[in-house]
Image (cartoon, rainbow, N blue to C red):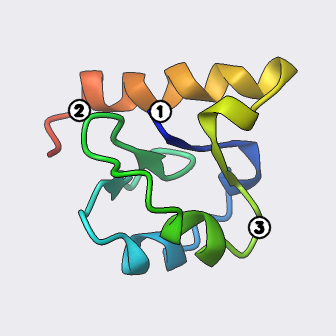
């Protein structure tokens, strides 16, 4: 998974990242606390990272410590949802 949405998105859910994603790989549900990036669809373009107003999006290789858990959190969202 190239890019991951992390903790700063929780409760904010600004859709700026969704609007710039060229492959429509960022989703959420009404009851989810944040947006998530589909690890099987992300093309590593960085458009979402630049658009995020709360700096919640990072490349998976740059995540450290507790923030690395968001790699699995994003992937698990797609495993449990009937989303593209």
Residue 25 position in % (x across, y down): 30, 54
User: Which one is in front in this view, the residue at disc 2 or the one at disc 1?
Assistant: 1
Q: Earlier in the sequence, mark 2 or mark 3?
A: 3
Secondary structure found at label 3: loop
Q: Earlier in the sequence, mark 3 or mark 1?
A: 3
Lateral position of residue 78 relative to residue 69, left or right: left
From the image, tell me which residue sits under label 1.
74
Please tell me which residue is depicted at 83% across the width and 25% down the height of the picture.
64
- Residue nearer the viewer, 42 or 54: 42
Secondary structure found at label 1: helix
**Circle on res. 82:** none
Up/down of 11 relative to 52, above or below: above
Please tell me which residue is depicted at 77% across the width and 67% down the height of the picture.
54
From the image, tell me which residue sits under label 2.
81
Alpha carbon distance from label 2 to label 1: 11 Å
Other-residue count near label 3 (Cα within 10 Å), few / some / many at <14 / 14–19 / ≥20: some
Q: Earlier in the sequence, mark 2 or mark 1?
A: 1
Alpha carbon distance from label 2 to label 3: 25 Å
Other-residue count near label 2 (Cα within 10 Å), few / some / many at <14 / 14–19 / ≥20: few
Lateral position of residue 72 relative to residue 8, left or right: left
Residue 68 position in % (x across, y down): 70, 23
- Residue nearer the viewer, 12 or 65: 65
Q: Quadrant of residue 65?
A: top right
From the image, tell me which residue sits under label 3.
54
């Amino acid at each position: 998974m190239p890019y991951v949405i992390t903790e700063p998105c929780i409760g904010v859910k600004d859709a700026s990242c969704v609007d710039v994603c060229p492959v429509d790989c960022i989703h959420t549900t009404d009851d989810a606390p944040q947006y998530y990036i589909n690890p099987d669809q992300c093309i590593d373009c960085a458009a979402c990272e630049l658009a995020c107003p709360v700096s919640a999006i990072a490349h998976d290789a740059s995540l450290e410590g507790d923030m690395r858990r968001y790699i699995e959190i994003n992937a698990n969202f797609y495993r449990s949802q009937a989303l593209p």
